[in-house]
Amino acid sequence: MIARDLSNSHLIKQIRKKPVAIIPVGSTEQHGPHLPVSTDSDIVSFIAEKVSEKTGFLLLPTIEYGVSFEHHPFFNLSVTSGTLQKYLIEICASLWKNKIRTIIILNGHHGNQKALKEVPSKVVRIHGIKPKILVYSYWHFMKQRFDHAGFVETSIMRAISRQVDMSKAEKGLVEDGLSKKELYRLGKTANKSFIAVTRNGVWGDPTQATAKDGRKILGKIIASIVKESQTCLTGESRKLHQ
């Protein structure tokens, strides 16, 4: 249940029962000609809501702007890494004041990773508090290789959204036949200019994506995040952002 939909009394009861909050973080950026610019935010919001339903964790509203400058000159509404960090640091401090000591930052955009992984240590340094802050990117919980507007993201969006126009879906950069060295080089270039690498803003091939595939991928991701988060409350988690 989303926090803004709870009355004050119900919210207090939920915090007392399970003092864990989930903050979904997405982006607003181009996703090829066939997907909406809200794709990252839509996906991470859906996953976070399902995790919240299964665990009882407090679901906070999604942050829908991320670090997406690499998509220029294609459409992106971006904030700097420092701005995103400051926003999350203050939210974490505010949650602490409301007696919420465990926070899951669930990331939905690759370009956010560097900024997000520094948030836990900066919360300690700036505010002198020590909440347990877990930073997850949802694609670390699936077997498929991460893409951008390719088979994986398009399948997931077909499963959760009506804002997919498959008549406009077109193949982008396909990894088949590329060596690890070539992929590493292309990845570094894409971090600076995604369009220089993909041309049409698509990394992967979305043309065969189906809602059925999307539901399977989502099921695995959600189950794995639930398991991981529960493990973190009682033991030591694997490190996902090295």
Image (cartoon, grey):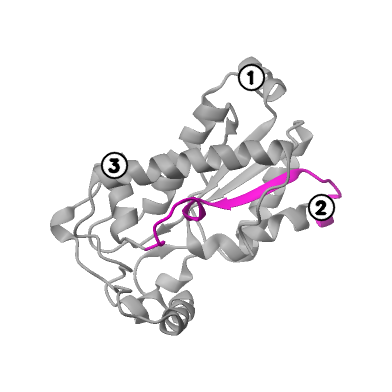
Please name the amino acid that badge 2 sits on.
Answer: Val
In this picture, residue 38 sits left or right of residue 115: left
Residue 145 belongs to the span the image colors magenta? yes
Mark 3 highlights which residue?
159
- Residue 93 at x, y percent in the picture: 75, 43
Please name the amino acid that badge 3 sits on.
Answer: Ala
Please name the amino acid that badge 1 sits on.
Answer: Asn
Mark 2 highlights which residue?
124
Disc 1 residue crowd, few under 14, some 14–19, many 20+, Cα 10 Å: few
Q: CA distance from mark 1 to mark 2?
A: 28 Å
Q: Nearer the viewer, residue 12 or 233?
A: 233
Residue 8: mark: 1
Task: Kindly report which numbered mark, 1 or 2, lies closer to the viewer in this rendering.
Answer: 2
| Residue 124 visible | yes
**The quadrant where residue 144 appears:** bottom left
Identify the residue at image location x=43%, y=43%: 220
| Residue 45 visible | no
Earlier-in-chain disc, 3 versus 1: 1
Q: Secondary structure at mark 3?
A: helix
Residue 110 lies, with reference to residue 163, above or below; the image says below
- Residue 216 at x, y percent in the picture: 34, 43
